Image (tube, rainbow, N blue to C red):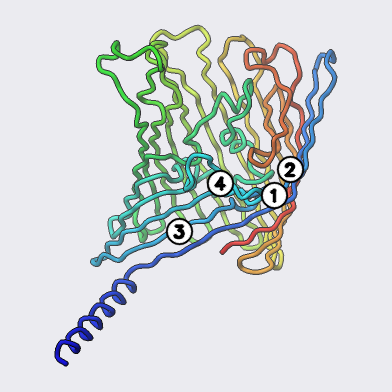
């Protein structure tokens, strides 16, 4: 009888301990499903009139035009003394096909392990870069769908050969893997901030002359370093960020290529209307041991002006964005690439978790800027465009693009 009572007591203590541990830990499942019927159209023309104009159009069942479709798991454990451990696994999905956005990394949106306390938060893994936060937070359309700003369309897409998008391809624009990040703690009078360093994780040879000629030495490619600081209090929110990503490295060419991004942005909520603004400066720097006459450097300036206005259970969104790019390339005197974009949209909230939305956008390209109306995996229409070596030398030019999204978003 005593032995049986002992077993019962041990079981009770075990259950109590399990209950206590459970109370100190939380795990949740979350996600967003966002689907739309979209229409995209582009037109290209030859200024000389030698070649016929070309128009492309496409209907698509698209995804992630109000919010990126995703599912994920997150959890925290209270370690006591104000210290907590946490994890976050978030996968991007294309709900029109059921596929994950990334074919090689399931949790491509975020995959982090963190330790937080009064000192702030130390976060390890794949996460948003500091410089991207300003692009998405201070854009009324959040850098998704046809309404995304011109600067995010330029930097967020890889593009086909011979386009400015391809020249500025940066895998670290939105997120960086292999990263160590630190976030300032809350309670600093409205001030917030983040710093990040992402490792390239490539082999380095010392001395450099021992580098094998093939494959090319990419010891620094993939590295990212950046930071962001801001202030939010009541209706006002302002922030500035800077980051540098190493996007090319070739020892035998004596070349390292950096994509440096700086931006400053802010918003002010007047109540009836909320205003947004951002200015961005992006530079592709080719660091040569012996620089050629034409370095291939690119200097880009862009800005976004936007507004959102609550109307009953809905929200009207509008934005204008502009960018211009100066390319120091093999063709002297090539004109600056320019693009202007207008976007207008409406979101109708059916509940706290479900909304209908419609967005229309118009893009005017000049001198071969070739910004498409939507980025893959949604749209695939583009422009007939010469190679960068022929910019300013005739040939078909990207002219205009239009895009429409009619969709529904549900979060859980």
Front-most of 316 and 373? 373
Q: Secondary structure at mark 2?
A: strand
Considering only order in the chain, which callout, 2 or 1, is on the residue closer to the N terminus? 1
Tag 3 secondary structure:
strand
Q: Quadrant of residue 384?
A: top right
Q: Can you tell which of label 3 and label 4 is closer to the viewer?
A: 4
Which residue occupies 50% across, 31% down? 170
Residue 342, numbered circle: none
Q: Picture coordinates of residue 30 (x, y %)?
A: 51, 61
Residue highlighted by disc 3: 73
Q: Which residue is mark 2?
A: 361
Residue 7 left/right relative to 169: left
The image's mark for residue 100 is 4
Tell me the CA gap for discs 1 and 4.
Answer: 30 Å
Q: Secondary structure at mark 4?
A: strand
Q: Residue 35 at what x, y percent from top left?
A: 68, 53
Badge 2: residue crowd in 10 Å (few <14, some 14–19, many ≥20): many
Callout 3: 10 Å neighbours few (<14), some, many (20+)?
A: some
Which of the two discs, 1 and 3, sits closer to the camera? Answer: 3
């Amino acid at each position: 009888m005593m032995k049986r009572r002992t077993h019962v007591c041990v079981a009770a203590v075990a259950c109590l301990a399990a209950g206590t541990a459970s109370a100190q830990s939380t795990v949740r499942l979350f996600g967003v499903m966002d689907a739309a019927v979209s229409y995209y159209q582009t037109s290209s023309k030859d200024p000389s009139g030698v070649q016929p104009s070309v128009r492309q159009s496409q209907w698509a069942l698209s995804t992630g035009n109000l919010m990126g479709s995703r599912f994920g798991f997150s959890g925290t454990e209270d370690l006591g003394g104000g210290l907590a451990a946490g994890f976050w696994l978030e996968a991007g999905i294309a709900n029109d096909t059921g596929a994950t956005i990334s074919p090689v990394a399931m949790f491509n949106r975020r995959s982090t392990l963190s330790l937080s306390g009064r000192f702030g938060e130390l976060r390890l893994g794949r996460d948003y870069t500091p410089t991207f936060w300003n692009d998405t937070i201070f854009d009324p359309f959040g850098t998704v769908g046809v309404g995304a700003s011109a600067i995010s369309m330029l930097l967020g897409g890889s593009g086909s050969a011979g386009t400015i998008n391809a020249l500025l391809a940066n895998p670290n624009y939105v997120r960086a893997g292999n990263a160590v990040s630190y976030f300032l703690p809350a309670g600093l009078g409205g001030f917030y901030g983040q710093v990040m360093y992402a490792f390239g994780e490539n082999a380095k040879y010392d001395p450099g002359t021992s580098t094998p000629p093939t494959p090319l030495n990419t010891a620094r490619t993939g590295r990212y370093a950046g930071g962001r600081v801001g202030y939010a209090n009541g209706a006002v929110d302002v922030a500035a960020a800077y980051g540098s990503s190493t996007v090319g490295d070739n020892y035998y060419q004596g070349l390292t290529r950096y994509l440096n991004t700086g931006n400053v942005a802010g918003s002010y909520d007047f109540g009836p209307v909320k205003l947004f603004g951002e200015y961005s400066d992006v530079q592709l720097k080719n660091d040569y041991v012996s620089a050629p006459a034409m370095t291939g450097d690119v200097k880009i300036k862009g800005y976004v002006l936007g507004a959102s206005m609550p109307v009953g259970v809905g929200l009207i969104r509008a934005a204008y964005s502009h960018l211009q790019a100066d390319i120091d390339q093999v063709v002297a005197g090539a004109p600056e690439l320019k693009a202007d974009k207008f976007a207008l949209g409406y979101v109708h909230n059916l509940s706290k978790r479900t909304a209908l939305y419609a967005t229309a956008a118009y893009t005017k390209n000049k001198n071969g800027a070739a910004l498409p109306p939507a980025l893959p995996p949604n749209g695939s229409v583009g422009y007939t465009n010469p190679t960068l070596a022929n910019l300013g030398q005739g040939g078909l030019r990207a002219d205009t693009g239009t895009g429409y999204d009619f969709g529904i978003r549900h979060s859980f």
